[in-house]
Image (cartoon, grey):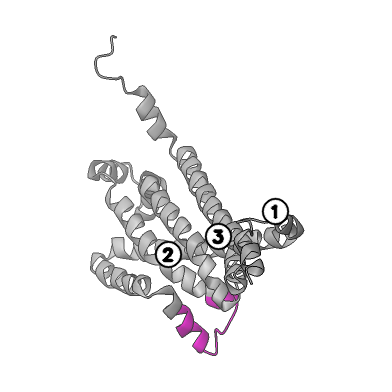
């Protein structure tokens, strides 16, 4: 009577032989997870940039735009996927997963882009206008570069959030490491659950580090300012 229970109790948390036998599957799910994340954040960033430029140009539009994005962000992921799947145009698959994922990035990115653009000092804008910069040229050459730290911060948050949400999209047939987690839960088998969870966290950390490095490359003046600042009490 106690034999099967004892065997189940001695089951290791991770069976490395199973991991070795499923390396190709794990690699495929890795690229699926990366693709879902990058496409969602990329589309979300493009849409948010357009919305942010509209909101900065016509300030009265910001609250309605942010309100719509807030409503999308507030919908529970399972409910949103359920709504999309019930629409014939979407159904199961990549399209449904991406629509939901993009929707969750908009509020984060819109707020950070607008905050970054609003943070550009007025004297800097005035100086650029005095040098004859047209509005669109000033936006590209002055406003957006100075807003880069806030924009990258938004991208970091949106990307890490999306990496986590991608695991939920396994419910609509496109889940990356979420497929491993679902497989483990359905069979009461801990190995794929642990592997899927650990790799999802590792991927989120990797994306976060990449954005930190990207910000350092895109804003060299910020490093120059920090290294050029003399500590208090230092002798000349």
**In this picture, is 99 found above or below 131?**
below
The image quarter containing residue 112 is bottom left
CA–CA distance in space, label 2 to label 3 = 11 Å
Q: Quadrant of the C terminus?
A: top left
Q: Which residue is denoted by mark 2 in the rendering?
A: 105
Residue at coordinates 58% horizontally, 81% vertically from top-left?
92
Alpha carbon separation for disc pair 3 and 1: 29 Å
Where disc 2 sits, the SS reads: helix
Name the residue furthest top: 236
Residue at image mark 1: 16
- Mark 3 or mark 1: which is in front? 1
Out of 80 and 121, give the one closest to the viewer: 80
Labels 2 and 3: the sequence-earlier one = 3
Q: Position of residue 107 (x, y in %)?
A: 36, 65
Residue at left 70%, top 57%? 19
Q: For residue 38, which numbered disc appears in the image?
A: 3
- Write the start and end of the magenta stretch as one range: 80-96
Q: Residues within 10 Å of mark 2 (few under 14, many from 20)?
A: many
């Amino acid at each position: 009577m106690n034999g099967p229970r004892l065997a189940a109790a001695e089951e290791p948390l991770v069976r490395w032989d199973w991991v070795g036998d499923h390396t190709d599957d794990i690699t495929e799910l890795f690229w699926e997870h990366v693709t879902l994340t990058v496409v969602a954040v990329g589309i979300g960033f493009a849409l948010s940039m357009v919305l942010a430029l509209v909101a900065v140009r016509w300030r009265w539009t910001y609250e309605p735009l942010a309100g719509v994005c807030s409503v999308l962000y507030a919908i529970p992921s399972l409910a949103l996927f359920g709504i999309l799947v019930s629409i014939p145009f979407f159904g199961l698959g990549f399209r449904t997963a991406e629509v939901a994922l993009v929707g969750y990035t908009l509020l984060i990115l819109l707020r950070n882009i607008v905050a970054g653009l609003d943070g550009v000092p007025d004297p800097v804008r005035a100086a650029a206008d005095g040098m004859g910069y047209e509005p669109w040229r000033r936006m590209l050459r002055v406003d957006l570069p100075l807003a880069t730290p806030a924009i990258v911060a938004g991208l970091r948050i949106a990307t890490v959030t999306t990496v986590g949400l991608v695991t939920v999209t396994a419910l609509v047939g496109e889940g990356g490491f979420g497929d491993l987690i679902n497989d483990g839960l359905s069979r009461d088998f801990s190995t794929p659950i642990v592997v899927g969870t650990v790799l999802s966290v590792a991927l989120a950390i990797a994306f976060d580090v990449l954005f930190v490095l990207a910000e350092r490359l895109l804003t060299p003046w910020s490093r120059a300012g920090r290294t050029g600042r003399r500590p208090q009490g230092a002798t000349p």
